[in-house]
Image: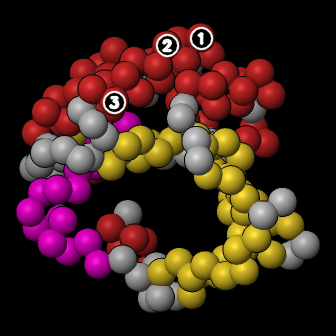
Amino acid sequence: MIKDIEDIGFDISDDVKEKRLIFIDCYSPAAEEKGKFKIVNILDLNGLFITIQKTLKRLKPPILFVFDSLTDLLLRNERNSCLKFLKALIGLLKEKGSIGIFILQEDVHDQKTIASIEYLCNGTIRLHVKNKKRMVEVKRMKGVFGSFTFKLRHKDGLILKEFFRY
């Protein structure tokens, strides 16, 4: 995962060295390296929450928390339990003065589930392809609206182009 991040142009070597970047691995048996956390069973939402809570206590705010992906969580757990987990997690992040980014593959879920998740979150950013262009659309966020196209170039990171409003 670190190599994937670096391959798109982000230098995170200092973050890794200073232990400001922490992965909580719900799947990989190889996650038993020192300094990493492991959840053996993604069905254990309480255990996952406790691990996230302990991890956040080790970090100084502001914290950028990325959950990749809510789809995996929703496919393996009951919908209402996931929504309660997400609500508690968002509350924990707000308490810490932190930002949470939650990735969701919308084509996998029904509109009711997507709407429920969007309701819990402060904003929604949608990545999609339109007319053969990669698009970033800010669907809902206080004080922000619109969409723009973008290009990804190897080793250059995210290049934003042609910002326009709907």
Q: In the shown orientation, is residue 134 left or right of residue 142? A: right
Q: Position of residue 44 (x, y in %)?
A: 38, 18
Q: Position of residue 31 (x, y in %)?
A: 25, 47
Which residue appears at 17% of the width and 56% of the height? Answer: 20
Of the residues tagged 3 and 1, which is closer to the observer?
A: 3
Tell me: residue 126, above or below residue 134. above
Kindly indicate the quadrant of the structure image that contains residue 119.
top right
Q: Is residue 107 above or below residue 3?
A: above
Q: Which residue is mark 1?
A: 80
In the rendered image, the residue lying farthest to the right is 131
**Amino acid on which the number 1 mark rests in the picture:** Asn
Q: Name the N-terminal-most of marks 3 and 1.
A: 1
Spatial separation of the CA atoms under disc 2 and disc 3: 15 Å
Q: Which residue is mark 3?
A: 94
Q: Is residue 13 magenta?
A: yes
Q: Which residues are magenta?
A: 11-29
Q: Are marks 2 and 1 in contact (CB under 8 Å)?
A: yes
Residue shown at 27% from the left, 26% from the top: 95
Circle on res. 84 = 2
